[in-house]
């Protein structure tokens, strides 16, 4: 996972109560380029943050967890 991805997640968390998805995407893409982040990614992270999970790291997929147990 890139440091930039983590940074974007912090920005989403910062903007979550102040801006809508389009405004968040515009602010991020104005600075980092048009393809920096898409609306679906922002939606996914907002849902996760709103559920109370504020961990900005990626979750392991089930198959990755099983592989790590070996």
Image: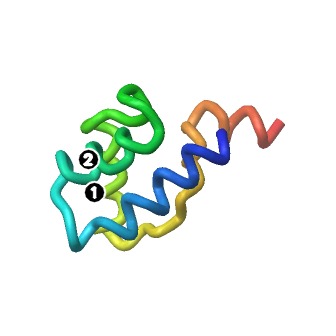
Residue displayed at 83% across by 36% down: 70
Q: Circle 1 sits on which residue?
A: 47
The answer to whether residue 23 is left or right of residue 37 is left
Please rate how many residues cluster around mark 2, counting C-alpha atoms within 10 Å: few if below 14, some from 14 to 19, many from 20.
some
Which image quarter: residue 15?
bottom left
Which image quarter: residue 20?
bottom left
The answer to whether residue 4 is left or right of residue 54 is right
Q: Secondary structure at mark 1?
A: helix
Residue displayed at 38% across by 70% down: 14
Q: CA distance from mark 1 to mark 2?
A: 6 Å
Count of labels in the image: 2
Look at the picture and state if 48 lies above or below 40: below
Look at the picture and state if 61 lies above or below 6: above
The answer to whether residue 68 is left or right of residue 27 is right
The answer to whether residue 61 is left or right of residue 38 is right
Q: Circle 2 sits on which residue?
A: 43
Q: Residue furthest right?
A: 70
Along the line of sight, which residue is nearer the eye, 6 or 50? 6
Callout 1 touching callout 2 (CB < 8 Å): yes
């Amino acid at each position: 996972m890139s440091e930039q991805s983590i940074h974007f997640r912090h920005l989403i968390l910062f903007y979550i109560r102040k801006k809508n998805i389009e405004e968040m995407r515009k602010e991020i893409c104005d600075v980092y380029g048009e393809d920096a982040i898409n609306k679906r990614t922002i939606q996914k992270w907002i849902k996760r943050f709103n559920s109370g999970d504020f961990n900005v790291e990626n979750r392991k997929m089930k198959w990755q967890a099983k592989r790590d147990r070996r």
